[in-house]
């Protein structure tokens, strides 16, 4: 309704012709992607209350937690301040920052997919030749993001209602609010840039800056009152204070930001031609400098690799800096110690903390390898691969360039994560680097599955996101919920040795590497035999 109001004010009902049809088409295209994003986010939130009941079941344990968060600025930078010791408030504290960030990523991807992606592929020009209003595609993209965020808000509010109705509603609306702020921000960036890849990258960079601002503000104060915290939409979510005397007026910040950014996006959309942008792509040199398919793949994906590398290095620095305080955080809480030991091994709380954090970055690296592998799918479906393959470039050579970036980039980002841990922790550089590189075997299996799906059945290639999300959920939530080991073993990461601290076991690592090679080989064999998408 908000998006419709913008468009009506900007140019009348004709500007919205075909919006309903485009919205239904967008939701149909994302009938797998949206449920995966929403489901993973909702499960992450709704699984936390029972975990926190086990971790902080007594008042003494909760009082100790409150004291730790008030005095430990590094931990506040990681997850934010605690405003109350109820289970609902602790849930909002523990996962609120990350739930908001996931909603933002989901929203920006949806909006760019249904706006700039469509223009870049040429499909939007074909659609606009029919009875489709000028602002209908943008409206449909924003409404698709609104539907996804609304479902997420309903699931969170409904699942958390048992811990307090008003807090549950505030928490659900806050998470959705963060999502819609970044949805409308992505809508603006999609008008400014000529590349969907750049639009996603720039909006993600803004999200990263918002996370850093929130972290810097929370490390400075223990009540979320820092100006830096208030400059971040993620900081607004924590200052909404679900389950801690809710500040309902903070929701007006989300509404105002979404309305203002939406108005700017609609104004920009009316001032440019389809396929054009306000920041046109810089023309390349008169004489081409790309001499191989691999060089082209690196040129297309280097921004993504550099962004992930920087993010993993900074994450390593932050987590490494928290390591010395891990024992103080756990204290005498046996349940917390058990969770860290399930995630990182039983070699001592410090090594277990390091191993669990390194394992978490390995799980997140699986998202990188899926995105990088599926760049092949995007190049094929957009039609950009066809003229390249029409020349003296074979399919395997073309695919090998992108796969080298995908699998080699995994090694690079995990290596930089290890360097970040070494900088933040200041000890055991060699063992930490080795621990990070061991995670590569698990990441490569997920990448191999993505190659297999793309090569054999390209229409199912997007299911690789669901597999990566499921693995992330198992590794993140499984140990806290005390799920059976058989469930944890479904993930390839469940078979890796718990390093540092544990003993290196080459058998599982070599098996996983062999499985990844077989998966990639089968996928490339399928790509070589099947017809290309036209």
Image (spheres, rainbow, N blue to C red):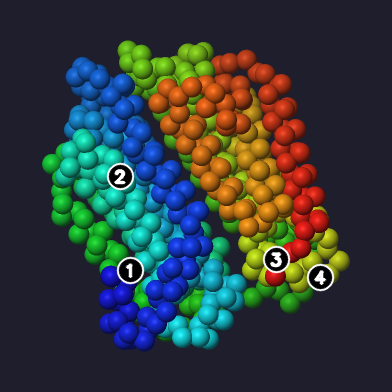
Between discs 2 and 3, the one toward the N terminus: 2
The residue pinned by badge 3 equals: 533
For marks 4 and 1, give the CA distance.
Answer: 43 Å
- Residue 50 x %, y %: 31, 27
Q: Residues within 10 Å of mark 1 (few under 14, many from 20)?
A: many
In terms of image quadrants, where is residue 48? top left
For marks 2 and 3, give the CA distance.
Answer: 39 Å
The residue pinned by badge 2 equals: 156
For marks 3 and 4, give the CA distance.
Answer: 14 Å
For marks 2 and 1, give the CA distance.
Answer: 26 Å
| x 31%, y 21%: residue | 54
Between discs 2 and 4, the one toward the N terminus: 2
Q: Is residue 385 left or right of residue 256?
A: right
Q: Residues within 10 Å of mark 4 (few under 14, many from 20)?
A: few
The residue pinned by badge 1 equals: 261
Q: Provide the secondary structure element on which disc 4 rests.
A: loop
Given contact means CB atoms under 8 Å apart, are the residues at marks 2 and 4 in contact? Answer: no
| x 43%, y 74%: residue | 21
| x 53%, y 27%: residue | 488
For marks 2 and 4, give the CA distance.
Answer: 50 Å
Between discs 3 and 1, the one toward the N terminus: 1
- Residue 496 x %, y %: 61, 25
Q: Residues within 10 Å of mark 3 (few under 14, many from 20)?
A: few
The residue pinned by badge 4 equals: 390
């Amino acid at each position: 309704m908000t998006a419709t109001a913008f468009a009506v004010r900007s140019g009348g009902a004709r500007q919205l012709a075909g919006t309903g049809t485009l919205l239904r088409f967008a939701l149909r295209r994302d009938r797998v992607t949206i449920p995966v994003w929403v489901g993973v986010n909702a499960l992450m939130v709704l699984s936390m209350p029972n975990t926190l009941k086990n971790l902080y079941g007594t008042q003494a344990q909760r009082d100790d937690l409150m004291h730790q968060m008030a005095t430990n600025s590094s931990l506040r930078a990681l997850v934010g301040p605690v405003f109350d010791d109820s289970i609902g408030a602790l849930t909002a504290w523990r996962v609120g920052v990350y739930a908001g960030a996931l909603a933002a990523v989901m929203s920006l991807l949806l909006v760019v997919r249904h706006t700039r992606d469509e223009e870049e592929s040429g499909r939007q020009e074909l659609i606009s030749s029919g009875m489709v209003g000028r602002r209908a595609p943008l409206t449909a993209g924003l409404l698709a993001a609104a539907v996804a965020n609304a479902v997420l808000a309903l699931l969170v509010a409904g699942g958390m209602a048992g811990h307090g109705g008003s807090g549950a509603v505030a928490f659900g609306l806050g998470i959705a609010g963060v999502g819609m702020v970044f949805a409308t921000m992505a809508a603006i960036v999609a008008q400014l840039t000529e590349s969907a890849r750049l639009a996603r990258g720039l909006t993600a960079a803004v999200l990263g800056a918002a996370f850093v601002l929130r972290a810097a503000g929370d490390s400075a104060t223990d009540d979320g009152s820092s100006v830096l915290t208030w400059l971040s939409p993620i900081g607004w979510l924590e200052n909404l204070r679900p389950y801690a005397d809710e500040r309902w007026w903070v929701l007006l910040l989300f509404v105002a930001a979404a309305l203002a950014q939406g108005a700017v996006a609609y104004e920009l959309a009316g001032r440019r031609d389809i396929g054009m942008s306000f920041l046109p792509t810089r023309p390349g040199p008169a004489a081409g400098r790309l001499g191989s398919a691999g060089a082209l793949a690196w040129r297309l994906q280097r921004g993504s690799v550099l962004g992930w590398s920087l993010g993993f290095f900074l994450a390593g620095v932050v987590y490494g800096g928290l390591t010395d305080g891990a024992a103080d955080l756990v204290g005498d809480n046996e349940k917390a110690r058990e969770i860290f030991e399930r995630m990182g091994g039983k070699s001592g709380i410090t090594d277990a903390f390091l191993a669990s954090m390194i394992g978490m970055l390995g799980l997140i690296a699986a998202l990188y390898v899926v995105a990088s592998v599926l760049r092949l799918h995007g190049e094929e479906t957009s039609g950009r691969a066809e003229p390249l393959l029409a020349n003296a470039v074979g399919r395997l050579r073309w695919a090998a360039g992108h796969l080298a970036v995908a699998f080699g980039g995994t090694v690079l980002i995990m290596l930089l994560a290890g360097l970040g841990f070494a900088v933040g922790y200041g000890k055991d550089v060699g063992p930490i680097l080795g621990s990070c590189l061991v995670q590569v075997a698990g990441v490569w299996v997920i990448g191999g599955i993505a190659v297999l799906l793309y090569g054999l059945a390209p229409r199912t290639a997007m299911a690789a996101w669901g597999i990566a999300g499921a693995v992330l959920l198992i590794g993140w939530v499984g140990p806290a919920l005390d799920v059976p080991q058989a469930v944890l073993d479904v993930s390839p990461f469940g078979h890796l040795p718990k390093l540092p601290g544990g003993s290196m076991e080459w058998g599982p690592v070599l098996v996983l590497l062999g499985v990844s090679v077989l998966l990639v080989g089968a996928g490339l064999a399928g790509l070589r035999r099947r017809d290309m998408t036209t």
